[in-house]
Image (cartoon, rainbow, N blue to C red):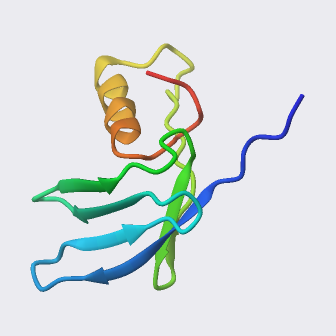
Amino acid sequence: MSAPPEPHEMVHEGTDPSGAEEWRCPRCGRHFIVRWPPDYDRLVLAAGDENATHFGRKGEASLRRIEATPASGEPPSAAEDAWRRWLRENGMDWDGRVA
């Protein structure tokens, strides 16, 4: 069994006065601008390696891996499926399963 691929660390390039943040992956070239909720928006400038798990940190906070699993062990609800899909579509991996 082969080892999982190493995650790519995104670098925070800066934040503009509107609160939009620019992020870049020096390893694969992924590059995007994001505005966080409640006015979430993301503009991908370069896709980079879309199969890589990306993580980033700003200051002392970091986001590495998100795991979303049903507490009861039952199949995910429609809401959980939607959340997993949103995470995947926004470049975040949770546990490697596709919703």
* Placement of 74 over or under 91, stated as above or below: above
Name the residue nearer the viewer: 95 or 91. Answer: 91
Give the quadrant of the N terminus: top right
Splitting the image into 4 quarters, where does residue 31 fall? bottom left
The number of numbered badges drawn on the structure is: 0
The residue at the point 46 percent across, 85 percent down is: 59
Residue 5 horizontal/vertical position (percent): 72, 45
**Residue 16: where, in percent of width, then height?**
18, 83
Residue at position x 60%, y 59% in the image: 8
Q: Tell which of 41 and 50 is nearer to you.
A: 50
Residue sitting at x 53%, y 54%: 54
Q: Is residue 32 left or right of residue 1?
A: left
Answer left or right for 14 relative to 54: left
Judge by depth and name the residue closer to the eye, 47 or 15. 47
Residue projecting furthest to the right: 1
Quadrant of the image containing the C terminus: top left
Along the horizontal axis of the image, is 46 left or right of 8?
Answer: left
Where 25 falls versus 59 (above or below)?
Answer: above
Residue 64 position by quadrant: bottom right
Name the spot of residue 30 as percent of width and height, x first: 44, 57
Residue 72: x and y in percent read 53, 22
Residue at 41%, 37% in the rendered image: 88
Q: Is residue 26 left or right of residue 18?
A: right
